[in-house]
């Protein structure tokens, strides 16, 4: 009985000594943790002070950079409307990689008030004398061309202005004057053709065959204004 009590007292003294830090601790602070691990043989190391491969930045992963295809732009100016429609159809059928941007140019012309051509120079001079007597300003006798010996009484950019001039002349007694259209320029269009530089030769060949009278130019590059 005394031995049992002695052992119990000794055990309590050893416990209090260990709790009080009288026994030297292990140099490895994680030694006790290793002993407390569960299923330690199933633990796998995924990295040693390195980030996982899937967290690498895209530029470090060596992703290839896509190159943008180089484009050209050809300019075809003052094309008749019929030629524009025909060439747009050709592009759609033969060179679908190209796209055409059309811009319309309005037609232009002028109007003149005139007395039709007279039989000869003497008749034209006689009519000019009559106009002077009627105090008609600004006229001249046409000396050449299809309207030789006609008398021009004014050239105007629109028909309304020509009609006003004709009324003034008739008020002065000029009965043979009339309005005519001259220097008429029909409506046209300009095409900007954009497409891959790799097919530039095919495009130029198509233009030369379909529009031999038109020489293509390179489109002007519009630069952004400085900020």
Image (spheres, helix red, strand yellow):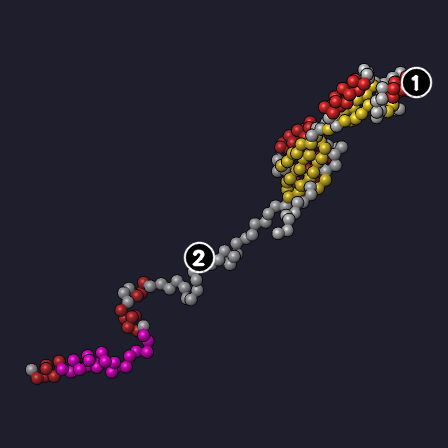
* Dot in front, 2 or 1: 1
Q: Which residue is mark 1?
A: 122
On screen, residue 194 above or below 13: above
Quarter that holds the N terminus: bottom left
Q: Residue lying furthest left in this view? A: 1
On screen, residue 56 above or below 87: below
Name the quadrant containing residue 155. Answer: top right
Name the quadrant containing residue 39. Answer: bottom left
Between 111 and 86, the one lying in front of the other is 111
Numbered marks: total: 2
Q: Is 208 situated left or right of 6 in this image?
A: right
Q: Tell which circle, 2 or 1, labels the residue nearer the N-terminal end.
A: 2
Q: Residue at position x 44%, y 58% from top?
A: 55
* Residue count near mark 2 (Cα–Cα under 10 Å), binned few <14, some 14–19, many ≥20: few
Q: Which residue is mark 2?
A: 54
Q: CA distance from mark 2 to mark 1?
A: 102 Å
Whether the magenta-drawn stretch holds residue 14 is answered as yes
Residue 174 can be seen, yes or no:
yes
Give coordinates of residue 118: x percent, y percent: 87, 17
Q: Secondary structure at mark 2?
A: helix
* Residue count near mark 1 (Cα–Cα under 10 Å), binned few <14, some 14–19, many ≥20: few
Q: Secondary structure at mark 1?
A: helix
Which circle marks residue 203 in the picture?
none
Name the quadrant containing residue 84. Answer: top right
On screen, residue 161 above or below 35: above
Residue 146 can be seen, yes or no:
no
Q: Residue at position x 89%, y 20% from top?
A: 129
On screen, residue 95 above or below 40: above
Give coordinates of residue 96: x percent, y percent: 61, 35
Give coordinates of residue 207: x percent, y percent: 71, 35
Task: Give the magenta range.
Answer: 9-29
Q: Is 16 situated left or right of 114 in this image?
A: left
């Amino acid at each position: 009985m005394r031995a049992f009590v002695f052992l119990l007292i000794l055990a309590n003294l050893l416990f209090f000594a260990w709790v009080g830090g009288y026994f030297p601790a292990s140099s490895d602070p994680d030694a006790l943790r290793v002993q407390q691990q569960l299923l330690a043989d199933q633990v796998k190391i995924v990295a040693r002070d390195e980030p996982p491969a899937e967290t690498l930045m895209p530029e470090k992963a060596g992703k290839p950079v896509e190159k943008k295809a180089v484009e050209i732009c050809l300019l075809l100016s003052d094309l008749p409307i019929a030629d524009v429609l025909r060439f747009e159809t050709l592009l759609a059928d033969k060179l679908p990689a190209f796209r055409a941007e059309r811009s319309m140019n309005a037609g232009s012309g002028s109007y003149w008030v005139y007395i039709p051509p007279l039989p000869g120079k003497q008749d034209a001079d006689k009519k000019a004398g009559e106009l002077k007597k009627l105090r008609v300003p600004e006229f001249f006798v046409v000396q050449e061309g299809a309207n030789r010996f006609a008398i021009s009484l004014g050239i105007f950019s629109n028909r309304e202005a020509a009609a006003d001039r004709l009324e003034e002349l008739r008020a002065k007694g000029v009965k043979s004057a009339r309005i005519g259209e001259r220097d008429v320029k029909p409506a046209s269009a300009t095409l900007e053709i954009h497409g891959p530089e790799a097919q530039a030769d095919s495009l130029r060949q198509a233009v030369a065959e379909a529009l031999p009278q038109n020489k293509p130019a390179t489109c002007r590059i519009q630069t952004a204004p400085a900020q």
